[in-house]
Amino acid sequence: MQKRSRSGFWVGLIIGSVLIAMIICFVFIYIGVKEPEVELAETTPAFNRDTPESKSLAQASPMVSQVTSAPLPSSEYPAQAVVQIIVAGKVEGKAEEWSGSGTIISPDGLILTNAHVAIGDKFYQAEELLIAMTEAEDIPPKLMYYAEVVQADTGLDLAVLRITSDLHGKHVNSGALNLPYVAVGNSDELRLGDKISILGYPDIGGKTITLTSGEVSGFTAETGYGNRAYIKTSATISGGNSGGLVTNERMELIGVPTQLGAGDEEVDIVDCRRLADTNRDGYIDEYDSCIPTGGFINALRPVNLALPLIEAAQRGEVAFVEPSKPGIAVPAGGTIIFQDDFSDPSTGWPTISDNTGSVGYSNGTYEIDVHKTEYMKWVLGGVNYRDLIIAVKTKVINSVGNGDYGLVCRYVNNENFYMLEITEDAYYSIFKYQQGERVTILDWQFSVELQDLTSADIEVMCIGDTLTIIVNGKALGQASDTSFSRGDYGILVGTWDTAGFKVAFDDLIVQQP
């Protein structure tokens, strides 16, 4: 019998041990990577008011990146959550900058501010939004990011921004930002005399953050927004703080300083920087629209009115909400007293051409072509009536991007008449010229209904003291005025900073109600 070798025993033992170790490791690895089976809890709605504590936005919404940071502590003023918003835009072709304030409301870069800060208006349209962060209370804010508007409600004058890139244009990962932010409070809990604090940047150009203290002095109602449409305050707030942070004593966000003032209080709340001839009278003066740059604010928008915008932004939605309008009563049509499809060039409309432009028949339509900047041309029907309904089809022949066109009613002379207009950049308005001065009745309002229109059916109703503008069957605006009781009607086209705007009119119908 052959004797067994001990070396073979040890070799076998070693190989067996290695195999056993490999099996154990495999089992542990498998267990470690296997996804545990868990029972999913019901989704809790954002901003649950059933609990006294305010939930952070990151916790409240499953759409926000899972950032574990908490809001800034309630033991100190949340200055680091306040940003300065530098707005870059063009006014009459020239680059301009203006500023406002905002509040970071989530660690992934959502910012609450005023809509007029982030969007501007027809004459001061924002092109870029730069975000300057507060690094310390005693040094100016530092430019760090670009942002874009994701939610805006011009009726509330509130907007939510999202940080998108650094100053070099490099996309930022919002989930990795982990920015200091403020908890959202409940503005419905406010009572008269409650202490509040306002943080913001009153001026552009190297100034540090400013703190203003005050108390709740009242509330103002507004149709569509309830009895707490505005919070009135005893604090004197500089106009540049518009869009900034208002906190309660727990340092929660409860309001936004808003440049609109409160109710019918007769307060000179804003200083303006006028850069454009917005009434086309050839002068830039106190009669023109302006960029708000100073003055004082005494009204705050409650944060509860902003919750739908914040929640929509959390879900990743992008939307522009137009001002809510009361129901516009549109009377039925009346008796046709004149109509023209402009197919016959002998129906009496003039054909004129000069250095300001031309008017005349063209290919079965009637065209108005304006060759001069900041200029209006109109052509009248030659009647004198009190109440009229005027409808016409329009088509932009040569676009300039921001030209306006529409109808005239109750024309008395070149210095006294009403005009109801729409623009290429999706605004509508109702104005009057009275003693040669352009006066706003319904200021320029943006409407998604007018975006990208090159053809539109425009109808205006001048009945009694009521003026109504209807586009493609939708009543956009209505206002009242008693300045003129009767007069002529007409069609008009105007330019701003670019000449060469041409519009064709067709199928004109004039009725008496």
Image: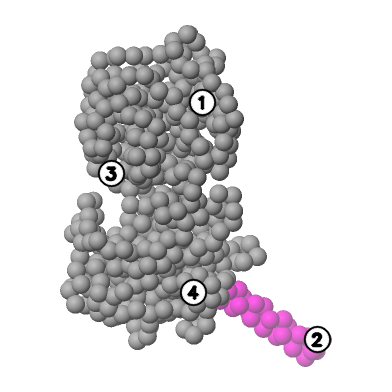
Q: Which quarter of the image is occupied by the C terminus? A: top left
Residue placed under numbered mark 3 in the picture = 325
Magenta part of the chain: 1-29
Magenta residues: mostly which secondary structure? helix
Which one is in front in this view, the residue at disc 2 or the one at disc 3?
A: 3
Residue placed under numbered mark 2 in the picture = 1
Query: Which sits earlier in the primary sequence, circle 3 or circle 1?
Result: 3
Q: How is the image coloured?
A: one colour
The structure residue drawn at horizontal position 57% and vertical position 71%, both measured from the top left corner, is 143
Label 3 to label 1, Cα distance in Å? 32 Å
The structure residue drawn at horizontal position 41% and vertical position 54%, both measured from the top left corner, is 286
Residue 206 tag number:
none
Q: Nearer the viewer, residue 407 or 226?
A: 407
Which one is in front in this view, the residue at disc 3 or the one at disc 4?
A: 3
Q: Is residue 14 magenta?
A: yes
Q: Secondary structure at mark 3?
A: loop
Q: Is residue 119 magenta?
A: no
The structure residue drawn at horizontal position 44% and vertical position 12%, both measured from the top left corner, is 348
Q: Nearer the viewer, residue 183 or 421?
A: 421
Task: Check the image and name the residue furthest to the bottom.
Answer: 6
Residue 347 visible in the current orientation: yes
Task: Write down the quadrant of residue 432 in the picture.
Answer: top left
Which one is in front in this view, the residue at disc 3 or the one at disc 1?
A: 1
Query: Which sits earlier in the primary sequence, circle 2 or circle 4?
Result: 2
Residue placed under numbered mark 4 in the picture = 179
The structure residue drawn at horizontal position 38% and vertical position 80%, both measured from the top left corner, is 211
Q: Which quarter of the image is occupied by the N terminus? A: bottom right
Instruction: Say what amino acid the circle numbered 2 marks.
Output: Met
Residue placed under numbered mark 1 in the picture = 368
